[in-house]
Image (cartoon, rainbow, N blue to C red):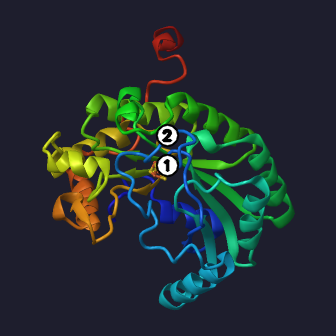
Amino acid sequence: MQKNRYRIYSQYLKEKYGEKVYKIPINLPVTCPNRDGTVAKGGCIFCGEEGAGFENLASSISVTEQLQRNIAYIQKKYKAKKFIAYFQNFTNTYLPLEKFKEYIYAACEENIVEISISTRPDCVNDAYLLFLKELKEKENINISIELGLQSVNYHTLKKINRGHSLAELIDAIIRIKKYGFESCVHMILNLPWDDEEDVMEGAKIISSLGVEQVKLHSLYILKDTVIGKMYERHEFEIISLEEYVKRVIIFLEYLNPEVVIQRLAGRAPKENTLFCNWNTSWWKIKDAIDERMETLDSYQGKKFDYLNGKALRRFLHT
Ligand code: SF4
């Protein structure tokens, strides 16, 4: 049997919960401070009207109904019994605290073992975390927080109009850890303004912060977005699929082997997409990464040797 060359999310969930667990997306009627003018207007240059929730049910449907409908489908298809309620789209903590509580309470159903909340690094606040900690203890439900970062290069963060820098991510992770929750950081490994050094640095920063999970995305470009217009004007080039595979491997080699990998490439809506995954399905990209790692005898953590005062090693091993 082939050995796993990186830590696979589905296996991690099986170890943690003793059986298969599926993530159920929930779409809330929220927006994002980077879109409504609080932080910036218009959002990240790649953000489309639907955010990341293009496969989700409408946000006008109640949390309970979205859960029921999605669970019924997954239960039938995969015979699953345990689920993660995944508040996926836009910035799910960007709500008045009482409203936020209401939505989260609605997801505390018997078969929900975890609540996963997707948000921005500048929308992580102690009051919200304290509520989640009390909920975790009362309802015996795990909590995880997913944070969009995309790049650790602060010049790139500016270029893509993230509206925050690396400092907010560091603050959010430290805060989330204080409350005992796991975090997942989202990274796009083929942003046109990033190079291999940025990708390597991203893995090193995520590892040194003790982040538990990562989700890797390949950039997709939608029509009528700022980046879409730049793309149509040929203002930047996108690296090749081979280069993307190389970057994923660099990232994984520098990453702490304990970090769980939720995903290796992104998925895009079929409509209005100018560029996505080099017209290749995400599973073929995954296969290409697996094969390349096998050929190179590469594995997650192969170069994870830079923490704990590396330069002092010569004194400790003599
Ligand atoms: S933070 Fe997320 S929701 Fe907000 S503008 Fe950026 S991609 Fe869109």
* Badge number at residue 158: none
Describe the element under mark 1 as helix, strand or loop: loop
Q: Position of residue 35 (x, y in %)?
A: 49, 49
Q: Position of residue 95 (x, y in %)?
A: 68, 55
Q: Which residue is mark 1?
A: 35
Compare residues 73 and 317 and report the one nearer the observer: 73
Query: Which residue occupies 34% across, 59% down?
Result: 266
Query: Which residue occupies 24% across, 39% down?
Result: 192
Task: State yes or no: discs 1 and 2 in contact (Cβ < 8 Å).
Answer: yes
Compare residues 84 and 275 and report the one nearer the observer: 275
Vertical placement of residue 167 versus 130, above or below? above
Query: Which residue occupies 29% across, 56% down?
Result: 220
**CA–CA distance between discs 1 and 2?**
6 Å
Describe the element under mark 2 as helix, strand or loop: loop
Dot 1, crowdedness within 10 Å: few (<14), some or many (≥20)? some
- Give the amino acid at mark 1: Arg
Vertical placement of residue 261 versus 252, above or below? below
Q: Which residue is mark 2?
A: 40
Can residue 303 be seen?
A: no
Q: Which callout, 1 or 2, points at the residue further toward the start of the chain? A: 1
Q: Position of residue 105 (x, y in %)?
A: 77, 68
For the N terminus, the quadrant is bottom left
Can residue 244 be seen?
A: yes
- Give the amino acid at mark 2: Ala
